[in-house]
Image (tube, coloured by chain):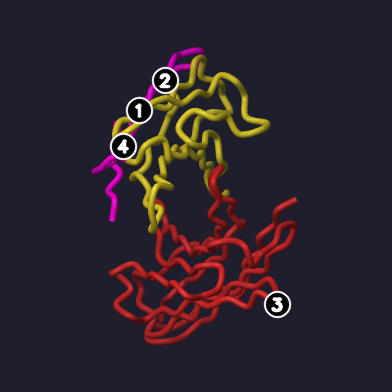
Chain colours: A red, B yellow
Amino acid sequence: EVQLVESGGGLVKPGGSLRLSCTASGFTFSNYIMNWVRQAPGKGLEWISSISSSSTSIYYADSLKGRFTISRDNANHSLYLQMNSLRAEDTAVYYCTRAGPRGDYWGQGTLVTVSS
Amino acid sequence: DIQMTQSPSSLSASVGDRVTITCRASQSISSYLNWYQQKPGKAPNLLIYTASSLQSGVPSRFSGSGSGTDFTLTISSLQPEDFATYYCQQSFSSPRTFGQGTKVEIK
């Protein structure tokens, strides 16, 4: 069974940093493109970053303006999102997703709250 | 990036109603279109992939159709557990962009 478990969310002050992790199981992690998607309170789904299976191709939403960095460790079946210079508008549930030909698998999400 | 536009943004319906949600892509995406259902506090749940294929375990009252730029999600007879928000997502190219969502509410 495919499982994705996010961790690392929490309360952080504006300007602070946070590192999210996603631990994958139930599939060959190194074969798949992985993504981070977020959802602000009461809002829709926003794709924020993707990384190819071997980390050779990485993409970010323009709205991030270089503040976030995606990475992965295939040996440890893990995906990461380093978030710097956090703003109130980054407050959201952050989901790790696995892209596939039959739709995406989603983790349960981790809440990031940016507030003083 | 491919833009996805859903309509309506919300609708009110009664149990037993037939409900239709549409999704339009800004360019042709062939049949690379997924539909998700999301309930409050939960992650999105895949309903339909490649426009018309029903995900395992999803009730047959859900169906999808379309290709190219125009797609439809239909719920043939709305059930109480179907009141939720629905999102389309294109999987034709990266990034896999989403529609803005359609909230289905009780009438």
Q: Nearer the viewer, mark 1 or mark 3?
A: 3
Precedes in sequence: disc 2 or disc 1:
1
Residue A102 is situated, as x and y percent measured from the top left of the image, at 56, 42
For this rendering, which residue is in front, A52 or B4? A52
Q: Which residues are magenta?
A: B1-28
Instruction: Tell me if I can see residue B2 in this picture.
Output: yes
Tag 2–tag 1 contact (CB < 8 Å): yes
Residue B104 is situated, as x and y percent measured from the top left of the image, at 42, 30
Chain identifier of the residue bearing label 3 in the image: A
Q: Do badges 2 and 1 share one subunit? A: yes
Q: CA distance from mark 4 to mark 1?
A: 12 Å
Residue denoted by label 2: B19
Q: Quadrant of residue B59?
A: top right
Q: Do badges 1 and 3 share one subunit? A: no
Residue denoted by label 4: B6
Residue denoted by label 3: A75
Q: CA distance from mark 2 to mark 1?
A: 9 Å
Residue denoted by label 1: B11
Q: Nearer the viewer, mark 2 or mark 3?
A: 3
